[in-house]
Amino acid sequence: ARSAPVITIDGPTASGKGTIAQRVARALGWHVLDSGALYRLTALAVLREGGDGSDEAQAARLARHLDARFESDTVFLGGEDVGRLIRQEAVGNLASRVAAWPAVREALLARQQDFRRAPGLVADGRDMGTVVFPDAPLKIFLDAGVEVRAQRRHKQLKDKGFSANLDDLLQDLRSRDARDRGRAHAPLVAAADAVTVDSSHQGIDDVVRQVLDLWSARGPA
Ligand code: CDP
Ligand code: CDP
């Protein structure tokens, strides 16, 4: 399983990673890893213990013992369907706080690597290409302008029935990006061997096609 191919998709919040990862995985018949969901689940577990993410030992303990189960379009925490709950911006923001703790990242590392199974894995997050799957044969760094990303996230939240304010969202995305890029451990950065794709002016279908073309041009080695 450790030799199964991996396509990594890293990038800032709301750049389209999750959507593109799902579509590419479906096209190839591969597994997916939404690594951000593990950080979001950890954040939710912290919230439920009344924490605020400032206690590294607490967050790491909860990360280590996460009772998480992934299904095709949702995720369970301790048997409860929390797929919708963890998509809230408040959970995303707390996720980016707990994700800065090295002990939390360490606690989630092996669990993420266990998703690598034949025939292949598409993994999305911040450090998939740099830390979790450094030997991945294809690494994508997916980017888009912050205003485009805020608009996309705004529409996405509205479509799901959440209330969202575009200006607040833009501020949230900016501070989350700054925290994710600026942290000492596994910061958001393109791997040296990553292909950067800017989707600011590209639709989902175009990006998916580009990734699939890159894959058929490079792999399987
Ligand atoms: O996973 P990540 O936070 O990077 O982003 P996402 O949840 O996959 O995408 C955020 C929103 O942008 C979704 O509603 C996508 O449908 C949309 N999107 C888009 O409109 N055009 C793209 N090229 C990529 C994503
Ligand atoms: O969908 P969106 O891009 O907004 O967020 P996400 O991918 O669900 O990740 C939520 C938070 O978890 C991010 O802001 C990161 O701080 C953290 N994260 C991380 O540190 N490393 C990863 N591989 C994935 C997510």
Image: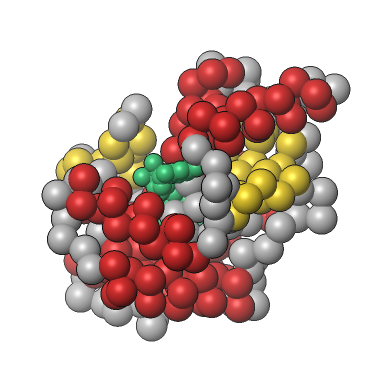
Q: Quadrant of the C terminus?
A: top right
**Residue depicted at x 21% and y 63%:** 164
- Up the image or down, 206 lies above or below 94; here it is above
Colouring used for the render: secondary structure
- In this rendering, the answer to whether 122 lies above or below 153 is above
Q: Quadrant of residue 7?
A: top right
Query: Where does residue 56 sit, x and y in percent of width and height?
Result: 44, 77
Res 149 visible:
yes
For the N terminus, the quadrant is: top right
Q: Position of residue 206 (x, y in %)?
A: 57, 32
Identify the residue at horizontal 74%, vertical 30% (top origin): 214
Looking at the image, residue 149 sits to the left or right of residue 46; the answer is right
| Image quadrant where residue 42 sits | bottom left
How many marks on residues? 0
Furthest residue to the front?
201
Picture residue at 52% right of the left edge, 76% below the top: 179
Residue closest to the eye, 107 or 149: 149
Give the residue at x 30% y 79%: 52
Q: Is residue 197 left or right of residue 110?
A: right
Above or below 119: residue 161: below
